[in-house]
Amino acid sequence: MTQNSPSPALPAGHPPVKAPKIGVLLINLGTPEATDYWSMRRYLSEFLSDRRVVEVPQAIWQPILQGIILTFRPKKSGHAYAGIWNQERNESPLKTFTRGQADGLRAALKGTHDDRIIVEWGMRYGHPSTAKGIDSLIEQGCERILLFPLYPQYSATTTATACDHAFRHLMTLRRQPAIRTVPTYHDDPAYIEALGAGVSRHLDSLPWKPERIIASFHGLPKMYLEKGDPYHCYCLKTARLLREKLGMDASMLTHAFQSRFGRTEWLQPYLEPMVKALPEQGVKKLAILAPAFVSDCVETLEEVNQGIRETFLTAGGTDFTYIPCLNDHPDHIDLLRGIVERELAGWL
Ligand SMILES: C=CC1=C(C)c2cc3[nH]c(cc4nc(cc5[nH]c(cc1n2)c(C)c5CCC(=O)O)C(CCC(=O)O)=C4C)c(C)c3C=C
Ligand SMILES: [Fe+2]
Ligand SMILES: [Fe+2]
């Protein structure tokens, strides 16, 4: 029986039976709808109320969040987003790139699997929602769904909360599809290959050679590592494999953690003081990439490519370059396709 083909075997009132398909849902973090105070406040409130992200007990955290942080942070963050906003589409770059990845993956899979695999995308916080993505896949006949959180290095604060959120929606469904989730891919040779190719491509396009490359990862409170979050180890392994792929040693390609939030200790070494100290140590030409992000976003385009660039040049650096994320580059689409085909083994 195929979609929309009425079967004489179905009794009156029976819901239509569709040809079974496989769905892939790309999930990224989420991003504000606009840069004004209330749009930023809505986004930050949802994000920072997630207990996977901030583990302070809610009775203590919510008054601090709603009363203090969400009074001041939306303005500061809104300003940062405004500086990197995709004016043409009137949306944040994270959304543009995530859509581009879904479009690219859909086209790549169509080539080999016709219409058997359907690709949608959704966000953990905000729009388009994870629930909408799942509903759309089901509506199109998907009885099996692969959830693909777009974080190469698993963390409870990103991958796990993306899956939690999808499962919360699945809890509301009478007819639930079968579900798989994509595991951490921080050491997947194809991911390392794509990262390495991106670094080489970018450096080849420059009229100068960096004296240091920093792989800068989004940070986490150090306590999360101590409680068992494997993200830190995965970041270090990605950095080591990338170094090996590029034939560099640790004095040439090093790692750091960025985007610290709040006053507790986060994973070290911190990016900002590291960069500030480099010119005095004789490193005047610097390149930075951000391998924990598959899409350029406020944390890479504003914090690194604007803020950290300025820090370095003000401290005496002469040349700075930011190496873009994998974004919608064909190498990234190939990587996503490879991971999807591997994780769908037995379903295809
Ligand atoms: C307690 C706070 C935070 C933790 C823990 C955290 C982990 C974490 N985040 C990413 C990826 C992204 N974070 C982004 C933005 C962002 N992150 C935090 C805080 C924590 N992140 C805030 C408050 C913000 C908003 C921006 C700001 O106000 O500074 C983004 C960018 C989204 C965008 O729209 O551009 C991404 C992506 C990872 C990978 C991670 C832990 C592994
Ligand atoms: Fe973050
Ligand atoms: Fe570790």
Image (cartoon, rainbow, N blue to C red):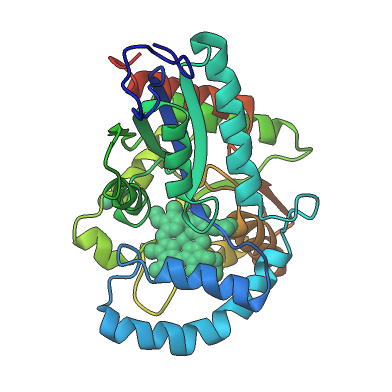
Percent position of residue 210, x then y:
65, 44
Residue plotted at (75% across, 37% down): 206
Image position of 83 (left or right of 301): right
Q: Quadrant of the N terminus?
A: top left
Q: Foreground: 85 or 287?
A: 85
> In this rendering, is residue 282 above or below 348?
below
Q: Foreground: 210 or 46?
A: 46
> In this rendering, is residue 45 above or below 235?
below
Residue plotted at (54% across, 86% down): 71
Q: Foreground: 277 or 188?
A: 188
Percent position of residue 140, x then y:
47, 29
User: Quick check: can you spot residue 74?
Assistant: yes
Residue plotted at (56% across, 58% down): 31
Image position of 227 (left or right of 262): left
Image position of 287 (left or right of 15): right
Percent position of residue 74, x then y:
59, 77
Residue plotted at (45% across, 90% down): 67
Q: How many marks?
A: 0
Q: Quadrant of the C terminus?
A: top left
> In this rendering, is residue 296 above or below 21?
below
User: Quick check: can you spot residue 259?
Assistant: no
Q: Which of the 4 image quadrants contains residue 149?
A: top left
The furthest residue to the left = 227
Q: Foreground: 47 or 5?
A: 5
The furthest residue to the front = 12
Percent position of residue 25, x then y:
44, 36
